[in-house]
Amino acid sequence: MLHIDAESYLPFMIFSIPIVAIVGGITVAVVKAIGRQRLVELAQQERIAALQRGVDISKLPALPNLALDDDDLSMLGVSGPERDRRRAQGLMIGGIITLFAGIGIMAFLLILGPDGDKAAWAVGIIPGAVGLALLLSAWIVSPKAGATAGPTQTR
């Protein structure tokens, strides 16, 4: 039958993980770029259809500008404090999940610790620290109550 030797299979698996991650990242970037371009094309088609029907173009929202927009929320017309609030909420959710995943890993390895290495629970400190960093960044980017909006961008 087919015999797979672990010594030859393990290096293949080790090097395949970053290759799959790189290919996946490139695929996500291409799909995002195509989606953003399609959104601009649909907005232009909407304007053309409105012109054909005699609608005043000044009443339509501004066209999305790919050169100025760095995030998906600004493409959808969300800007300023709302964008900052959504970003802070996303960071907070990610921070809470990662923090508690780290705590769960620490508890799991602490329970298994008496038989093996007594410091294995410390592995959970890494995701716990990442979760705390995400919570800190959520607090930093969250819109403050007394803060005023910055300069608006005109198109």
Image (cartoon, rainbow, N blue to C red):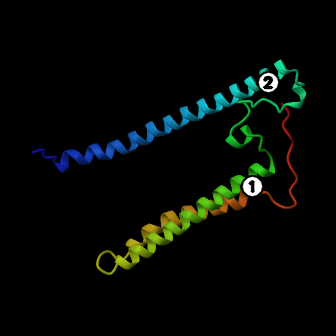
Res. 73 image quadrant? top right
Residue sitting nearer the eye, 150 or 100? 100
Res. 19 image quadrant? top left
> What residue is drawn where x is 76% and y is 26%?
46
**In the image, is residue 116 above or below residue 46?**
below
- Farthest residue to the left: give it: 1
> What residue is drawn where x is 19% and y is 50%?
6
> What residue is drawn where x is 45% and y is 72%?
106
**In the image, is residue 10 above or below residue 56?**
below
Q: Is residue 43 left or right of residue 123?
A: right
> What residue is drawn where x is 41% and y is 74%?
108
Q: Secondary structure at mark 2?
A: helix
Characterize the local packing of mark 2: few (<14), some (14-19) or many (20 or more) Cα atoms within 10 angstroms.
Answer: some
Q: Give the amino acid type for the residue marked by disc 2 in the picture.
A: Arg
- Farthest residue to the bottom: give it: 114
Residue 60: give its label. none
Rounded to the nearest angstrom, the CA distance separating label 2 from label 1 is: 31 Å
- Farthest residue to the front: give it: 53
- Coordinates of residue 142 in the picture (x, y in percent): 75, 58
Residue sitting nearer the eye, 68 or 56? 56
Q: Which residue is mark 1?
A: 85
- Coordinates of residue 99 in the picture (x, y in percent): 55, 66
Q: Which residue is mark 2?
A: 47
Q: Give the amino acid type for the residue marked by disc 1 in the picture.
A: Arg
- Coordinates of residue 122 in the picture (x, y in percent): 43, 71
- Coordinates of residue 101 in the picture (x, y in percent): 50, 66
Res. 34 image quadrant? top right
Q: Quadrant of the N terminus?
A: top left
